[in-house]
Image (tube, rainbow, N blue to C red):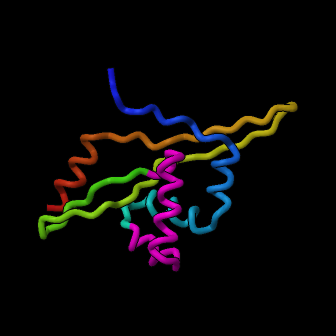
Amino acid sequence: MSDAPVAEEPDLATVVDLLEDEHVRTMLVATSAEPLSAAELAERCGVSDSAIYRRTDRLVAADLLRERTRPRSDGHHDTVYVAAIERFELSIRDGDLTWTVDRAETDVADELTRLWGKF
């Protein structure tokens, strides 16, 4: 039995509201290619770190973005963000509206290999 809270699937309005933001879309596209820190995202988006942190908090809460730890050679670490969404689909057909969010799978072995390769 796990004590970890089960994340509730966000509703359509929340997802659409998030994806409506141009900076959120830039963040998701950028972090789908590589893990990026808040400072790196702020630079890419041309906004302040605090604006990025507000967005990352909302994206993480909706499970569209995930936090990771990136070790540095000086013994410290950075928090970086990785897109958790691979696909968002909205369909309207035969009087029905359906939507799905396909999320990226997290493979621990791949993550360890990626981290090990940076040493």
Q: In this view, does 82 lie to the left or right of 118?
A: right
Q: Give the overall secondary structure of the magenta segment.
A: helix
Q: Is residue 114 left or right of residue 18?
A: left
Q: In which quarter of the image is the C terminus?
A: bottom left
Tell me if residue 66 is in the magenta stretch: no
Q: In which quarter of the image is residue 108?
A: top left
Q: In this view, does 57 lie above or below 110?
A: below
User: In this view of the protein, which residue sits in the foreground, 67 or 3?
Assistant: 3
Q: Which residue is the extreme one toward the right?
A: 95
Q: Is residue 103 above or below residue 26?
A: above
**Residue 84 spot, x, y in % from top left:** 46, 48
User: In this view of the protein, which residue sits in the foreground, 54 or 24?
Assistant: 54
Q: In this view, does 107 lie to the left or right of 62?
A: left
Q: In this view, does 114 lie above or below 74?
A: above
Tell me if residue 42 is in the magenta stretch: yes
**Residue 29 spot, x, y in % from top left:** 51, 61
Q: Quadrant of the N terminus?
A: top left
User: In this view of the protein, which residue sits in the foreground, 32 or 10?
Assistant: 10
Residue range highlighted in magenta: 38-65
Residue that appears at 53% across and 46% down: 62
**Residue 43 spot, x, y in % from top left:** 45, 78
User: In this view of the protein, which residue sits in the foreground, 77 or 106?
Assistant: 77
Residue that appears at 62% across and 56% down: 18
Residue that appears at 12% across and 70% down: 74
Residue that appears at 18% across and 66% down: 72
